[in-house]
Amino acid sequence: APVVLWFRRDLRLRDHAALLEAAKHSKHLLALYVLDDRLLKPAGSPRVAFLLNSLRELDNALSGRLMVRCGNPVREVVAAAREIRAAAVHVSADTAPYGRTRDEAVAEALAEHRIQWVPTGSPYAVTPGRVTKPDGTPYRVFTPFYRAWAQHGWPRPADTDVSIVDWVKPSSSVSLPESPSVDCALPPAGEEAALSVWHEFLSDGIADYAAERDRPDHSGTTRLSPYLRWGAIHPRTMLADLDSSEGAQALRSELCWREFHADVLWNRPETARRNYDRRFDGMRYDTGKTAQEMFARWCEGRTGYPIVDAGMRQLLAEGWMHNRVRMVVASFLVKDLHLPWWWGARHFMQHLVDGDLASNQLNWQWVAGSGTDAAPYFRIFNPTTQGQKFDPQGDYVRRYVPELRGVAGKAVHVLKERPEAYPEPIVDHAEERQVALQRYGAITGS
Ligand code: FAD
């Protein structure tokens, strides 16, 4: 009997454990994707556009045989499976809160029709929940998690021979909607694009990655995050190409951060919305009218702090922001403007093409000090020195803040004269730092 392969965060055909498993059971596979409003509505246009472009690429790779349905997955997956009299629905596991609940409901509905539910693999090298301390409890600190994760290891990439698969021609399928038009420049979508970005990085970027990854003025990182988000490439494919060089080790550790946050979210699903460290429930944040005005200035990239403004404008222009600058702007929102971290997290989720619940919410909490393994709250980024250190010639700032293009070199970080069009700093960092420390002291008694 034919089987269904329901694609979700695994929009590729290579190194695909669930596809391999499905192909073991049947040669006749129906490729299915369900457009689900519960996921699409909060996503923001850049990510939706990139998803739809990725689906178009997947459909091309399947010679137009991707069945697309629209609506509640409980109804749609069952209907698709029944339509072709499938024996089973294969998936790669979704470990985020909504996906878990949805999958339980779908599996239950399928069982009523005696259709099997078969999860194989996940979007991670090690499926969240599998790396535990010897006593079976989850890790709270990254470094020991990293050691245990590396020791746990992962299988070699699955060498799926898709030529043996006969993709069932869908009898009913909606056509993919047009991608919403977006103001930012999206990267090319799909598995081929992901692999070519990766192979180029292996030949040109990996050797210098350890030193270059903190330089937003250079293009020293992979920029694979949107592809990892939708599974156009699997982290295992990348890990298999990494040796023991310095650059490879640094990248392995970054990939592990992605797995660590997914593991935390798996163990504590409520941390998508709530503080991991519950002491922070008592933290005083500003939320009134002035706070909202400050927030709007932060979103637009008009705080008067050049590195912060460059980052926020990169986000609007590209749907992506360099990791170092994500940390700087997040710290600025929480510790200089005293705004709730979840305001910033929501803005990121609306604009990031790579927006991912686990990585986003838990990185925000990490910066805010309310997460696991926190950067101690009292270590407060100074936006000016961060700019001087990581954008030493000021090139990054000038690229995204046109008002400052007339200011040469590193002087963009400490403006002696402000061009008229560029705003005065909205707060004084030294003063706000003290306020932040006092508020922190009030919840920790330090
Ligand atoms: P590279 O340096 O090339 O790293 C390779 C891959 O490792 C990345 O693609 C990513 O999958 C993973 N990675 C690297 N750093 C981290 C990290 N700190 N946490 C988790 N995974 C990491 N990343 C997202 O994918 N989605 C998000 O929504 C997201 N939100 C963030 C919010 C804040 C406040 C901060 C500080 C970081 C956030 N990150 C998020 C992590 C990181 O900034 C991006 O993964 C990275 O900038 C993507 O660029 P890259 O692919 O070139 O990274």
Image: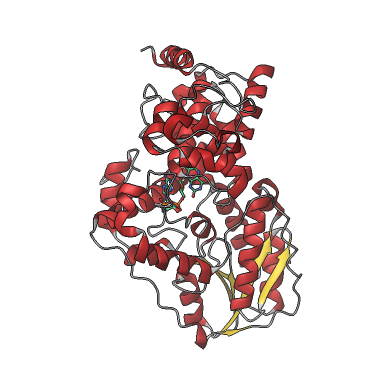
Residue at the spot 47% in from the left edge and 71% down from the top edge: 16
Q: Position of residue 14 (x, y in %)?
A: 47, 74
Can residue 176 be spotted in the picture? yes
Quadrant assignment for the C terminus: top left
Image height of 69 relative to 298, above or below:
below
Quadrant assignment for the N terminus: bottom right
Q: Position of residue 274 (x, y in %)?
A: 53, 32
Q: Position of residue 286 (x, y in %)?
A: 59, 18
Q: Position of residue 77 (x, y in %)?
A: 67, 66
Q: How many marks?
A: 0
Closest to the observer: 243 or 120? 243
Image height of 373 relative to 143, above or below:
above
Drawn side of residue 265 relative to residue 213, left or right:
right
Drawn side of residue 114 relative to residue 280, left or right:
right
Q: How is the image coloured?
A: secondary structure
Residue at the spot 58% in from the left edge and 64% down from the top edge: 189
Looking at the rendering, which quadrant does residue 82 occupy?
bottom right
Residue at the spot 31% in from the left edge and 46% down from the top edge: 145
Residue at the spot 70% in from the left edge and 49% down from the top edge: 41
Can residue 274 be spotted in the picture? no
Drawn side of residue 271 relative to residue 174, left or right:
left
Image height of 33 relative to 136, above or below:
below
Closest to the observer: 187 or 20? 187
Closest to the observer: 340 or 108? 340
Looking at the rendering, which quadrant does residue 406 occupy?
top right
